[in-house]
Image (spheres, rainbow, N blue to C red):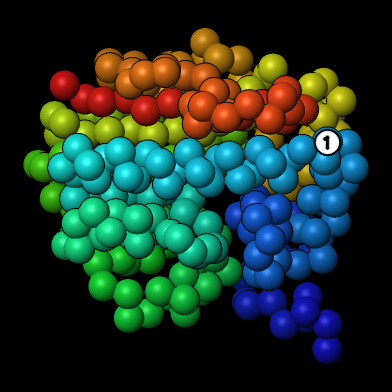
Amino acid sequence: MSENNRAPVGVDPFRPNPARVYNYMLGGKDNYDADREYGDRMLEVAPDTRVTAWHSRRFLLHAVELAADAGIRQFVDIGAGIPISPNVHEVAQEVEPTSIVASIDFDPVVFAHSNALLTGAPGVTPILADIREPDKILELARIEGGIDFSQPVAFLIVGVLHFVMDDEKPFEAVARLREAMAPGSLLAIQHASTNTHPFFKNTAATNAANSPAQPDFRPPERVREFFDGLEMLPPGLVPANEWLAVDPGPTSLVVLCGIGRKN
């Protein structure tokens, strides 16, 4: 029996999925043929895409460490993906063992993997929810994850928003999350930029047409709107390699990273 035939009920293994493609790019094994084929096509166009994936991962973990060092003990990881160590809760709890994480994803297979891989991990709660429904995220994070929104929280939205089309209201969704943030909270976002090489953008759009992996590349000024009302932490909204102060040279896929603080 092929791995595609063993896919959980409700999971379509024949269309690429963002979390599983990302897992493949990071060297994970929790992906299907369609995810690997899509990833390989991207690597043919831009072999440095795997480098960009690792930069995105490093940005996420750096944001967690920064938030934990600032005294934040609550984390809401939206689009958490399939767990790969070190994970958000591991980094946060290295600073403060009592830190808690609501690990949120909309993909049933990611949720299943999270439940299996994170069973017994203290302080981390896998939650099945979609960023397109921010009120549901807030409710489940509070009820199931134990997040107290009267206290500072770190919202982590890495590799998610460029898969939410404009008519699905991503800006309104993030605005609702910002509204729920107590003073001292942080918002970390990574988003694919229109500065990406045109050939890569066209190839990505063609290969992922009508799938959850269909990307919407946005210009930096639009991505900056996700941080409206927040103080941007240095170095601001910049490509991932600049945020991490590494210089691999220009990459075909440009992802912007930023962290905003609510004062």
**What residue sits 26% from the left and 73% below the top?**
122
Secondary structure under the numbered disc 1 in the rendered image: loop
226 to 41, vertically: above or below: above
Q: Is residue 90 above or below residue 8?
A: above
Residue 4 image offset from top left, x and y in percent: 78, 75
Pick the front one: 83 or 55: 55
In the rendered structure, the answer to whether residue 94 lies left or right of residue 31 reads left
Q: Quadrant of residue 119?
A: bottom left
Query: Residue at the spot x=42%, y=47% of the render?
Result: 61
User: Residue visible at 40% across and 41% down?
Assistant: 62
Residue 249 placement (x, y as % from top left): 71, 24
Residue 9 as seen in the image, left or right of residue 116: right
Q: Is residue 62 above or below residue 179?
A: below
Judge the density around disc 1: few (<14), some (14-19), many (≥20) Cα neighbours within 10 Å.
Answer: some
The residue identified by callout 1 is 46
Q: Is residue 103 visible?
A: yes
How many numbered circles does the render carry?
A: 1
Q: Farthest residue in the top direction?
A: 221
Q: Quadrant of the C terminus?
A: top left
- Residue 257 shown left or right of residue 231 in the figure: right
Viewer-proximal residue, 80 or 121? Answer: 121
Residue depicted at x 19% and y 50%? 73
Question: Which amino acid type corresponds to the residue marked 1 in the rendered image?
Answer: Ala
Residue 176 in picture, x, y percent from top left? 30, 32
Q: Is residue 145 visible?
A: no
Q: Position of residue 133 (x, y in %)?
A: 40, 44
Q: Nearer the viewer, residue 21 or 179?
A: 21
Which quadrant of the figure contains the N terminus? bottom right
Q: Quadrant of residue 8?
A: bottom right
